[in-house]
Image (cartoon, grey):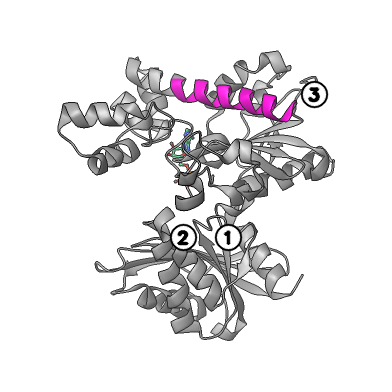
Amino acid sequence: MKILVINCGSSSLKYQLLDMADETLLAKGLCERIGIDGHLTHKPQNGKPVFNEDVAMPTHTEAIAAVLDKLTSAEYGVVSSMKEIGAVGHRVVHGGEKFAASVRIDASVMDAIAECIPLAPLHNPANITGIEACRAVMGDVPQVAVFDTAFHQSMPGKAFTYAIPYEYYTDLKVRRYGFHGTSHRYVARRAAEMLGKPLDALKLISCHMGNGSSICAIDGGKSVDTSMGFTPIAGLPMGTRCGDIDVSILEYLAANTGKDVKELTNILNKKSGVLGVSGVSSDFRDLDAAAAQGNERARLALEMFQYAVAKTVGGYVAAMNGVDGIIFTAGVGENSADTRAAICRYLGYLGVEISDERNAKRGEDTFISTDGSRVPVMVIPTNEELVIARDTRDIVEGK
Ligand code: ADP
């Protein structure tokens, strides 16, 4: 079965077409500036040329139509007709407490995704738009929703409850949800394969470190705690998000800057994190370069990030009463050997020992710990699209 994976944002749409016979990527691409003017970058993986041009996209429906046109065209295509596409898998950001697993989309699922809009006001409407656009262009091809939050629904109450009046949870659903679930789930399964042990017998800590970063404690294959919270702003300092801060700062800043909560929240999401501290960039490559040239605030931002990761890992070792493997993934986790090494230096008390030679490798699933390290440490490039495609296939085939 060939499966189209869609990750729809408010003005963008990323896609991949996978052949699930051997899990190969047939094509991938990106629609940008939807609703503004429109631009399509389409990359077939079969040797045909890349298409990289403006295409009018007044709505997501024209974007999906343009994607299907390219996927099936003689010049840029990878399939002969749309009929070859057996199903569509959508990344949906928030499933609230309604979804603990992926699900085939029908009218009641659409209603439930819409009910989660207050929890993800920017993301869920875009995801709904993407699903509706696919239905408009592809008719009744089965569609599946894969939620960023679903994997974390296994967290116990002690991990997901905030210490605020309980009715804010019962009435308004304020609790820790966690995100990046698809990524944490993927790397945990791969780690079990690499360790040659069943996933349900392992205690793992997954460090997803990209523009957005989160850490997950995975006990027996189930998420038992994670660092993002009610929203993705919580936990570690990130590219532009502040991570955990004292909530009273908000009132203090409102009183002293004249900015309202909305404006300040925007600053905490978009102008904080390593960008805010360094004043240089949200990109860890720029920070590494600036720190190497002696920029003290860039160095501080990097140190704060590494320290926060190490403290969170330590907390999760305590939460699970042990750890059998630590995983690094996503942009920074997969590429920055220095960041990984710096984090692992904090973990000497666990018996973690890194091999510089192994840590220098890139782009493949690999152990970076020495053979003598008491806890194995792995780098596993994440593949959320593959998880979405696998879930979609399994659900459509009734597995
Ligand atoms: P997103 O959270 O947007 O999916 P990614 O997982 O793609 O982000 O990670 C993007 C981040 O990865 C960039 O901001 C950049 O800081 C970081 N990154 C990529 N390559 C390197 C590298 N070689 N060294 C350090 N950081 C890197």
Helix, strand or loop at label 2? It is loop
Left or right placement of residue 124 versus residue 379 in this view:
left
Of tags 1 and 3, which is closer to the observer?
A: 1
Stretch of the chain drawn in magenta: 304-321
Amino acid at pointer 1: Lys
The residue beneath circle 3 is 371
The answer to whether 28 is drawn above or below residue 153 in the figure is: below
Helix, strand or loop at label 1? It is loop
Q: Residue at x 23, y 28 (%)?
A: 253
State the residue lying farthest toward the left.
258
The residue beneath circle 2 is 116
Q: Quadrant of the N terminus?
A: bottom right
Q: Is residue 318 magenta?
A: yes
The residue beneath circle 1 is 98
Q: Is residue 86 magenta?
A: no
Is the CB of the residue bearing disc 2 within 8 angstroms of ligand 1?
Answer: no
Q: Are marks 1 and 2 in contact (CB under 8 Å)?
A: yes
Res 373 quadrant in image: top right
- At label 3, counting other C-alpha atoms closer than 10 Å, the crowd grade (few under 14, some 14-19, many 20 or more) is few
- At label 2, counting other C-alpha atoms closer than 10 Å, the crowd grade (few under 14, some 14-19, many 20 or more) is many
